[in-house]
Amino acid sequence: MGRSKMPDGPFIIVANHTSYLDIFFMYSMLPKNAFVFLGKSEILTYPIIRTYFKNLNIPVFRFDRKKVGLSFTLAVEAIREGWSLVIFSEGTIPSENIPKMLPFKNGAFKIAKEAKVPIVPITFTTNHLLFSDPTMFFGPARPGISRYYVGPYISKEEVGRMSFSELKKLCFERVEAPLRKEYPKLYSNQGNV
């Protein structure tokens, strides 16, 4: 486990997504930070997670453009009210080669630029071994140690100065770095994702 210094004030947390444990552990990892999740509305269909997610977070109805815009507005508003925001920028849990990441979606970076806040990269490296997607009947569900890394944050000045694509690339690299170290075989003979 590694932890870099956290920025002051509200910020956006960008994390990889390998298991629904990622959601539950975030609160114990960051007990002194007030935050909400920005996540896909489909999560509201899972009973236990729905109860946990429903009143504390901002759902994204990905297939309804009006509601996507509303989610963006609510996210920026939450940041302006002092809340930090957690976004799993892959948009879903990968279905293969876990924990290798999927390309990041744009939302976190658009919000960071609009709200002018830092980005904190977080990497989960073992949650996929402990608990899978609830729809996977024979997926893993076992005790073990959850390892995570809080990488060096990207300051609000850097967020403002960098182009959108530079910011997205840098954040992806910072989240991916611990995975490359812990799972070198997954990344051998392959370029960047």
Image (spheres, rainbow, N blue to C red):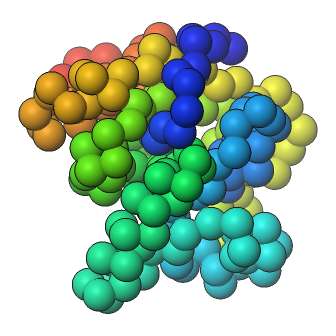
Seen in the image, is 163 located left or right of residue 28?
left
Q: Residue furthest right?
A: 143
Residue 165, image x, y percentages: 12, 37
Q: Would residue 49 be visible to someone looking at this image? A: no
Residue at image location 14% in from the left, 27% down from the top: 162
Q: Is residue 160 visible?
A: yes
Q: Residue at x 78, y 68 (%)?
A: 52
Q: Residue at x 49, y 37 (%)?
A: 11
Location of residue 127 by image quarter: top right
Q: Position of residue 5 (x, y in %)?
A: 58, 12
Residue 191, placed above or below residue 36: above
* Left or right of 59 in this view: 90: left
Image location (x, y in percent) of residue 89: 39, 49
Image quadrant containing the C terminus: top left
Q: Most extreme residue toward the front, as rendered?
A: 81
Tell me: 90 left or right of 145. left
Relative image position of residue 110 (x, y in whole percent): 25, 51
Q: Is residue 127 above or below residue 4?
A: below
Q: Residue at x 59, y 50 (%)?
A: 83
**Nearest the camera: 34 or 123?**
34
Q: Along the line of sight, which residue is nearer the eye, 140 or 11?
A: 11
Quarter of the image that includes the N terminus: top right
Above or below, 104 relative to 60 = above
In this rendering, position of residue 86 left or right of residue 160 = right
